Image (tube, rainbow, N blue to C red):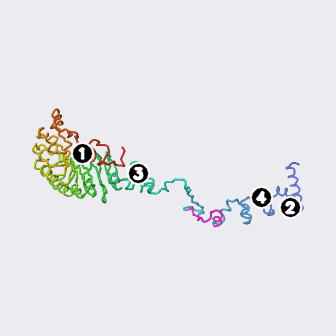
Amino acid sequence: MPLQDLSLQGAKRTHKRRAKGDGPDMECTPTELVLQRPPTELVLQRPPTELVLQRPPTELVLQRSPTELVLQRPPTELVLQRHPTELVLQRSPPLKHQRLSSKGKENHEFVLARRSRRKRPSPSELSWDRLPDELLLRILFYVPLQDLLRTATVCQRWRRLALDESLWHSVDLEGLTHMGPALQQVLKTGVRLLRCPRSFVEELQLTGPLQVVVMDLSSSIIPTSSLESLIGHCRQLQYLSLEGLQLSDTITSSLSQNTDLLQLNLSGCSGFSAPALAALLQSCCSIEQLNVAWCDFNNDHVKSVVGAVSAGVTHLNLSGYRENLTLDDVKLLVSRCPRLQTLDLSDSTLLMADSLPVLRQLKDLLHLSLSRCYHIHLAALTDLDQTLPVLSLLDVFGIVSGSHLSSLKKEMPRVSINARPFSSVARPSPACRPGAGFLWNRKCRLRFQQ
């Protein structure tokens, strides 16, 4: 039967019952009640079981007992409502402490954090961390300068090892420009052999004594104030070359405190007085080789040299003093320094043939240079092999040349003539290999490669 016909029949029956005064729901089926009554009456009159079936989930949750809620809720809600102590006991490993990682958040939840265990290397595996310092220092000994500086940036331990003074014993910074900060860092490592000729040095700010024993600053560009600070912190110098630099009386005074000085090269220097030079030579009485050629000297400077130089000097270069070196100066020098083996008096125009017999007192003289001493004639030179019995080298550039040189060699067969055009007295590098990186017959281990 169609649904509309059923609805009409039900409505007729209801009308008849109300007319008779009977109750509204006594004989009607549930379906008829649903169709006839409004929603509000249905909700109020139906039993609780039917209401529960029709209500939404939110109302069910609010009215159900805690036991039913626990059974129906998902596991995530159960975990959030449990006590934190239960969670720690269930999830954390033994002997581990919990850490609160919800710092700065509104909901303070406990989150377990476990440290990652570092894998222990097996005895057969090699690790840099397991190597002792002595072995690492031996490995770093063969690392070049640039790589050694990079090694110092790895970690604190490697920085300490990379800057160990045993690795920085000798350093070559030849030709380095703007080397003020680099030089300061190198000096702090306790370097003992420092070679930096033809370099450009800015201002230096040094503190504490330096351990430099051998130093070459030849032909460098360095302010006088920086050089004063550098020399002023040195007390152990034995080999020093300041060729071509501008000095001062303060520098020479600081040099006089290095009493163990053995070789000093001041050729081409200027800016210091004759008394300061004399005080320097008197304090450094152990000097064996001295080069003061072509300095900005007057006659007082020359007299300070010949009158104050150490009596034990064996190599002396006193060339370049055209009218300032006299025969009396030569006599005083020979009488005070009888152990001379190398003597360079080149470019002394006042010396004549009468100065050669004075040199007879030098029994150990091996090398004599009289280049450009134009007042010494050829006949006086031929007797030198008799005057100086152990003489083996003679330089007479500018005096003898051409056929006269050949005849002189025949007259003196055991003497090598004009074999060394450059003087090597107190110079750090050999005259034959000026750029080979040698420092008084020593090779620097660390060398800056441009």
Disc 4 marks a residue whose amino acid type is Gln
Whole-number angstrom distance, CA of label 2 to CA of label 3: 109 Å
Contact flag, marks 2 and 1 (Cβ < 8 Å): no
Contact flag, marks 2 and 4 (Cβ < 8 Å): no
Query: Label 1: how many residues lie within 10 Å, few (<14), some (14-19) or many (20+)?
Result: some
Residue 321 inside the magenta-drawn segment:
no
Whole-number angstrom distance, CA of label 1 to CA of label 4: 115 Å
Q: Position of residue 216 (x, y in %)?
A: 28, 49
Classify residue 61 by image quadrant: bottom right
Q: Name the residue under label 1.
A: 424
Q: Nearer the viewer, residue 94 or 320?
A: 320
Disc 3 marks a residue whose amino acid type is Phe
Q: Closer to the N terminus: mark 2 or mark 4?
A: 2
Q: Closer to the N terminus: mark 4 or mark 3?
A: 4
Determine whether 347 is above or below 240 in the image: above
Which disc number belongs to residue 141? 3
Classify residue 258 by image quadrant: bottom left
Contact flag, marks 2 and 3 (Cβ < 8 Å): no
